């Protein structure tokens, strides 16, 4: 009896949520969503009343619905029998308390649907002062803190992310009152490494901010000036307001609502079957293309030689015979541009170079994340060092395919690695890399990630280049 009843409750819940999901989908055509995001601009007109009305109606766009989507996103990513219960709890808390905190595998988020004051802190973090009625989860430690960087399982990343404290209390008056909700996130963690910039910050921010359609303020903890210079133009497309960052002396910023933390879907992944955005990785690529005014959506195969951009590494996983590789690529029929790390640091300029190329080639490493700037039908050629097969596929191989790119891997043989001269043939580092990888990143990293350079076998590599050249002709 009780079981049957539970089942029917579960069933009606399922039906309800399906209904809700289809409603959300209709309302949120995922194609070109980023265009809608740009529809709001702070008004500069003088007619105050009219501006007020506009502001009200854009508020009526309803950030509460946006917040609900984020809570739903949590539900979608939970994969156990507690799904419905958990969604119910989060929604109930949000409605009753104006505050709920949820956790996914990689991220912690707290959402308030009523007003908060957020004080900047000089150390890089922030303090969120909750309003009367906003209750923290039961039994939460005091002070209650979260680190708004979506790598919570990684102690190193978390150590580089300042805590944001949520406290009940009596703050100073507002220095600034903002019309829209705040999205609080950290540009600490591993930010500054291009893969992590894209994967841990920009994609999660793209996902989290999508339901707000530009009507949000970015409150960036651990923000360093270089990072803002690098990505400011992209951020501007997610929020037209200047980002708020740590300041001395502290300032108090007031918002009608806030999201603290970012959603995370996976390696270079926007999962289009999941809320909050129902956006695909290709949508993210299209968003970047728009933000940086890149010309090519699809690769144009001009009659001339295709451009191969070779990402040149200098400290680890270096191609020791790079000059010969470049010469050979020229023989095969490519125009080759060798790009140094310094050149890649100028994101906007380098994005334009990548967007105009046919092949992006590099040894496994963060530079390959520049694939997000490639036009469809361009190719990516990843050179996979010894022992890094799994990482190569997970971080770049699968994402490349999701982006609609042509993808090729060149796996080196052990003789092409400097590890060959360092270890006896039967040493596990050479004979059984998986056993080393299983011991954890702090064991495998000094060996495979930082501890080898490569001398490519020119005969074998030529075959790969020829195949890539042929791929481009398809
Ligand atoms: C913020 O407001 C407080 C209290 O009103 C004031 O003392 C402080 O000078 C203000 N700070 C800034 C940066 O305006
Ligand atoms: C996307 O999410 C769905 C569940 O909504 C899951 O089944 C699927 O595996 C995810 N896709 C990827 C590429 O992780
Ligand atoms: C590597 O990390 C694991 C768990 O993260 C830890 O237990 C171990 O002590 C670490 N080893 C070294 C050599 O740092
Ligand atoms: C790889 O090459 C770079 C540049 O020549 C050098 O600094 C580094 O020590 C080399 N690493 C190994 C493990 O040989």
Image (cartoon, rainbow, N blue to C red):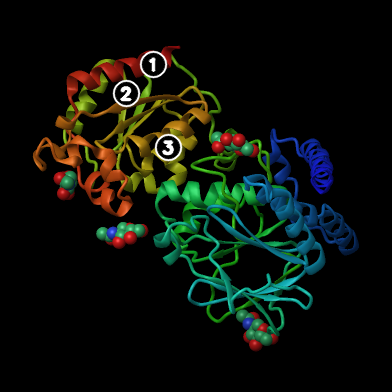
Q: x, y (%) of residue 218? A: 62, 60
Q: State the residue in front, 262 or 96.
A: 96
Q: Quadrant of ligand 1?
A: bottom right
Q: Which mark is residue 95?
A: none
Q: Is mark 1 within 8 Å of ligand 4?
A: no
Q: Which residue is mark 1?
A: 304
Q: Kindly identify the residue that appears in the image at 56 percent across and 56 percent down.
A: 107
Numbered disc 2: secondary structure: strand
The answer to whether residue 402 is left or right of residue 7 is: left
Q: Is residue 469 left or right of residue 406?
A: left
First reached walking from the N terminus: tag 2 or tag 3: 2
Crowding at mark 1 (Cα within 10 Å: few <14, some 14-19, many 20+) = few
Q: Is residue 441 above or below residue 145?
A: above
Q: Return the x and y of residue 443 as percentages of the image width and height.
A: 26, 52
From mark 3 to mark 1, how far is it between C-alphas? Answer: 34 Å
Q: Are marks 1 and 2 in contact (CB under 8 Å)?
A: yes
Residue that numbered label 3 is attached to: 394
How far apart are the alpha carbons under marks 1 and 2?
9 Å
Precedes in sequence: disc 1 or disc 2: 1
CA separation in Å, label 2 and label 3: 29 Å
Residue at numbered disc 2: 335
Residue 153 place in picture, x, y as percent: 47, 57
The picture quadrant where one finds residue 383 is top left
**350 to the left or right of 433:** right
């Amino acid at each position: 009896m009780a079981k049957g009843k539970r089942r029917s409750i579960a069933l009606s819940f399922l039906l309800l949520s399906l209904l809700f999901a289809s409603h959300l989908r209709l309302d949120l055509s995922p194609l070109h969503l980023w265009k809608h995001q740009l529809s709001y601009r702070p008004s500069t007109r003088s007619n105050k009343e009219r501006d007020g009305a506009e502001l009200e109606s854009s508020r009526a766009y309803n950030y509460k619905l946006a917040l609900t989507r984020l809570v739903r996103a949590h539900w979608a990513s939970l994969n156990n029998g507690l799904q419905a219960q958990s969604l119910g709890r989060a929604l109930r808390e949000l409605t009753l308390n104006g505050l709920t905190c949820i956790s996914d595998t990689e991220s912690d988020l707290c959402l308030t649907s009523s007003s908060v004051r957020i004080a900047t802190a000089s150390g890089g973090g922030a303090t969120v002062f909750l309003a009367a009625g906003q209750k923290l989860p039961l039994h939460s430690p005091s002070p209650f803190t979260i680190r708004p960087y979506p790598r919570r399982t990684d102690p190193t990343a978390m150590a580089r992310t300042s805590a944001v404290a949520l406290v009940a209390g009596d703050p100073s008056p507002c220095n600034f009152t903002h019309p829209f909700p705040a999205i609080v996130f950290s540009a600490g963690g591993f930010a500054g490494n291009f893969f992590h910039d894209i994967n841990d910050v920009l994609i999660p921010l793209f996902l989290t901010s999508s339901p707000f359609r530009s009507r949000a303020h970015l409150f960036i903890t651990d923000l360093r000036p270089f990072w803002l210079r690098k990505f400011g133009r992209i951020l501007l497309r997610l929020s037209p307001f200047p980002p708020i960052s740590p300041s001395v002396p502290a300032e108090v910023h007031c918002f009608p609502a806030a999201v603290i933390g970012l959603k995370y879907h996976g390696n270079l992944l926007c999962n289009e079957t999941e809320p909050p955005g129902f956006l695909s990785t290709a949508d993210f690529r299209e968003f970047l293309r728009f933000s940086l005014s890149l010309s090519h959506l699809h690769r144009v195969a001009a009659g001339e030689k295709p451009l191969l951009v070779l990402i040149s590494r200098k400290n680890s996983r270096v191609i020791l015979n790079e000059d010969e590789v470049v010469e050979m690529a020229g023989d095969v029929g490519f125009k080759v541009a060798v790009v140094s790390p310094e050149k890649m640091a100028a994101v906007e300029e380098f994005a334009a170079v990548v967007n105009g190329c046919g092949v992006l080639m590099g040894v496994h490493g963060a530079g390959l994340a520049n694939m997000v700037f490639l036009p469809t039908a361009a190719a990516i050629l990843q050179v996979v060092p010894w022992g890094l097969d799994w990482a190569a596929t997970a971080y770049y191989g699968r994402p490349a395919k999701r982006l609609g790119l042509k993808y090729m891997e060149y796996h080196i043989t052990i003789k092409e690695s400097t590890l060959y001269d360092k270890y006896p043939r039967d040493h596990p580092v050479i004979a059984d890399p998986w056993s080393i990888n299983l011991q954890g990143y702090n064991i495998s990293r000094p060996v495979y990630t930082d501890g080898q350079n490569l001398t490519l076998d020119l005969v074998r590599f030529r075959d790969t280049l020829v195949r890539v050249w042929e791929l481009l002709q398809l």
